[in-house]
Image: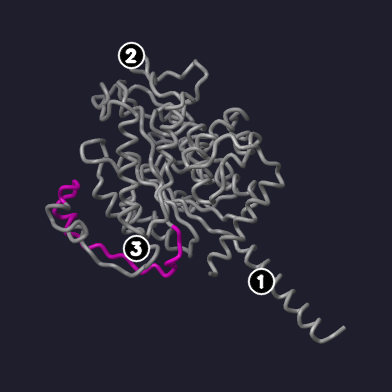
């Protein structure tokens, strides 16, 4: 045995060890968002929670103020969003596992949270949501804005396009650069008048905001904006509802208080609302090269409606009360007609999976495990995979791969990305 052979063998072992180490390092991903992200109700909300790091569970255990997750039996408060949460990130994690990818998934979410609220920690002193983002060096981050906040002024109760744009950029800087900041929102928006036009008071606009340095900032983190979906409760006539706090899921009931009556409508169709949301998210990504892209979940919802696969109208009866479809079509929306149903959450996860991994959602196949766990039939799962695939530009109805082929595709993609990162 020659010295040259020994050297070559040793070099080969080093290369194999280095390759194994590269493959062993998980892709860390953080989902920043709200109840659209954590799924709001079971079976999605708690799905795969053991495999997801719920970074807000500890905050909630200390102080649930302002949430719907007070301890069960607490009078006057909702007990229907109990931690730990898996949600859409939990479904995404299950999909990546099946694809042979190693993703470490975390979520930082709070019901009704906006990007501004997440960044400024406006909920209460206990919930350090911005601190969650700074808690480690992330491979990827997904930002989900409050449902209607990215809409143009006057087009929703929480419509605030200027604030969405400003705080999407704030998160991008915080994650990529991480420098400490001290600013007022009058400065952020360009003037006191522009700040007050967002609905803030003069005092709020001139309040000094002190943002500490993000010691885990990483210029290579891929940041995605997740496009929200249109809401039937903003489109179709109905009575104002309120969560029934006596139920385990806060199912909506007609609000008979002075705050009740006919709901305010903002759009004539789901398609019109989807178009505005599409423009807001894609315009933001185009204006800032720091974003890796937009995950077009809202467009995927609209595609499913346009194809006749999912219900697109008739969400309420003549009395303005919600009704469920009886014609065989899926309903992507839950009973409150704003949060996603299990079908909508599954479509969200598929669109995230395809956008973030680069793999065709159809590669998961008819027997995909998360769908089966959620009570979604193989036919429905395959149809929704086709919607997500089409939305992301994959050829629809490709032959379904065997399990080994799916795993091999994931490993090949991971190896390719490792080589690209080193180039």
Position above or below: 67 against 266: below
Out of 388 and 147, give the one closest to the viewer: 388
Label 2 packing within 10 angstroms: few (<14), some (14-19), many (20+):
few
Identify the residue position indicated by label 2 in the image: 319
Labels 3 and 2: the sequence-earlier one = 3
To which quarter of the image does residue 67 belong? top left
Q: Which mark is residue 173?
A: 3
Out of 320 and 173, give the one closest to the viewer: 173
To which quarter of the image does residue 13 belong? bottom right
What colour scheme governs how the chains and residues are painted in the rendered image of this protein?
one colour
Q: Is residue 121 toward the left or the right of residue 258 in the image?
A: right
The span shown in magenta is 196-222
Identified at 42% across, 42% down, the residue is: 296
Magenta run includes residue 6: no
Q: Is residue 302 toward the left or the right of residue 200 in the image?
A: right
Image coordinates of residue 6 in percent, x first then y, are 80, 82
Out of 76 and 288, give the one closest to the viewer: 288
SS class, disc 1: helix
Identified at 32% across, 36% down, the residue is: 275
Identify the residue position indicated by label 1 in the image: 18
Image coordinates of residue 350 in percent, x first then y, are 53, 41
Q: Nearer the viewer, mark 3 or mark 2?
A: 3
């Amino acid at each position: 045995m020659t010295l040259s052979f020994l050297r070559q063998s040793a070099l080969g072992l080093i290369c194999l060890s280095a390759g194994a180490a590269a493959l062993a390092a998980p892709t860390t991903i953080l989902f920043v968002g709200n109840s659209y992200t954590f799924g709001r109700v079971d079976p999605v909300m708690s799905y795969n929670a053991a495999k997801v790091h719920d970074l807000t569970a500890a905050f909630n255990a200390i102080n649930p103020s302002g949430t719907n997750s007070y301890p069960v039996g607490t009078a006057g408060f909702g007990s229907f969003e109990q931690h730990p949460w898996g949600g859409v990130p939990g479904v995404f994690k299950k999909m990546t596992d099946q694809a042979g990818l190693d993703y470490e998934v975390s979520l930082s979410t709070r019901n009704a949270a906006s990007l501004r609220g997440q960044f400024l920690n406006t909920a209460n002193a206990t919930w350090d949501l911005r601190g969650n983002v700074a808690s480690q060096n992330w491979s990827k981050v997904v930002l989900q804005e409050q449902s209607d906040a990215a809409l143009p002024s006057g087009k929703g109760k929480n419509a605030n396009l200027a604030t969405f744009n400003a705080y999407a950029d704030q998160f991008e800087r915080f994650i990529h650069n991480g420098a400490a900041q001290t600013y007022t929102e009058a400065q952020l928006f360009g003037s006191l008048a522009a700040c007050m036009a967002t609905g803030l008071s003069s005092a709020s606009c001139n309040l000094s905001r002190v943002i500490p340095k993000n010691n885990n900032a990483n210029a290579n983190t891929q940041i995605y904006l997740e496009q929200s979906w249109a809401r039937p409760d903003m489109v179709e006539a109905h009575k104002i509802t309120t969560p029934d706090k006596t139920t385990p899921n806060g199912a909506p009931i007609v609000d008979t208080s002075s705050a009740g009556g006919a709901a305010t409508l903002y759009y004539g169709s789901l398609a019109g609302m989807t178009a505005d949301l599409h423009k807001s998210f894609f315009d933001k990504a185009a204006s800032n090269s720091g974003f890796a892209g937009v995950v077009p979940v809202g467009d995927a919802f609209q595609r499913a409606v346009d194809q006749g696969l999912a219900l697109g109208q008739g969400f309420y009866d003549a009395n303005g009360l919600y009704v469920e479809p009886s014609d065989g079509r899926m309903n992507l929306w839950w009973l409150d007609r704003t949060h996603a149903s299990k079908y909508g959450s599954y479509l969200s996860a598929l669109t995230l999976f395809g956008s973030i991994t680069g793999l065709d959602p159809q590669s998961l196949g008819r027997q995909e495990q998360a769908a089966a766990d959620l009570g979604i039939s193989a036919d429905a799962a395959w149809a929704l995979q086709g919607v997500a695939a089409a939305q992301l530009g994959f050829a629809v109805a490709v032959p379904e791969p065997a399990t080994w082929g799916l795993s091999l595709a994931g490993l090949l993609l991971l190896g390719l990305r490792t080589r690209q990162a080193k180039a």
